[in-house]
Image (cartoon, rainbow, N blue to C red):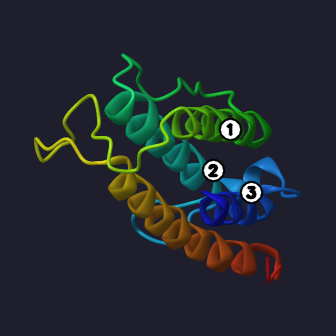
Amino acid sequence: MSFLDYLRDSVVTKFEGIDEQACRREFVASGTSLYWLVTHMTAGEINWFQRVFAGNDVGPPDAGPDDTMALAVRRYRAACRESRAIVSSSADLGHRSARPDRRGENPPLRWILVHMIEEVARHAGHADIIREQLDGCTGR
């Protein structure tokens, strides 16, 4: 869990200290921006830990047109806290999820953790590139 938390903290640093207009700037045709990344990562945390693993009836957080990057980062941090609590309540990495994933399988907690490490690391790389394009900020 500590490596996943390291990646989560690393990506949050890429979301801080940037104005609202810049955080929504898109550099690729897919529309990826820092704001999009943090909302996407929040939805991933909620989906995999709260919905799939724990079996809770939750969906992605609502974000209105007046949403700010600061609020989006707070939602991400809250989702990560909830994910940590769910993981800490299950000492067995082989424990299977309460709900099936999109493939119709009930993955074990170990698979979900590895998948989330992969996802957050991938998106941290995206955030690194976008942030460097925005203001030259590099590094963790």
Q: Which numbered disc, 2 or 1, marks the residue that appears first in the sequence? A: 2
Q: Amino acid at mark 3?
A: Val
Taking the spot 78% from the left edge, 48% from the top edge, the residue there is 20
Label 1 close to label 3 by CB (< 8 Å)? no
Q: CA distance from mark 1 to mark 3?
A: 11 Å
Residue at the limit of the structure toward the left, as seen here: 104
In the displayed structure image, the side of residue 44 where residue 38 appears, left or right: right
Residue 41: x %, y % from top left:
53, 49
Q: Position of residue 37 (x, y in %)?
A: 56, 55
**Could one spot residue 126 in this view of the protein?**
yes
Secondary structure, mark 1, is helix
Percent of width and height locating residue 2: 67, 61
The quarter of the rendered structure image containing the C terminus is bottom right
Q: Which mark is residue 35?
A: 2
Q: Which residue does the numbered mark 1 point to in the structure image? A: 72
Report whether 115 appears left or right of 105.
right
Residue 123's spot in the image, x, y percent?
A: 53, 66
CA–CA distance in space, label 2 to label 3 = 11 Å
Which residue shows up at 25% across the image and 47% down it?
Answer: 107
- Amino acid bearing label 1: Ala
Amino acid type, callout 2: Tyr
Residue bearing mark 3: 12
Give the mark, 1 or 3, whose residue is nearer the N terminus. 3
Front-most of residues 130 and 3:
3
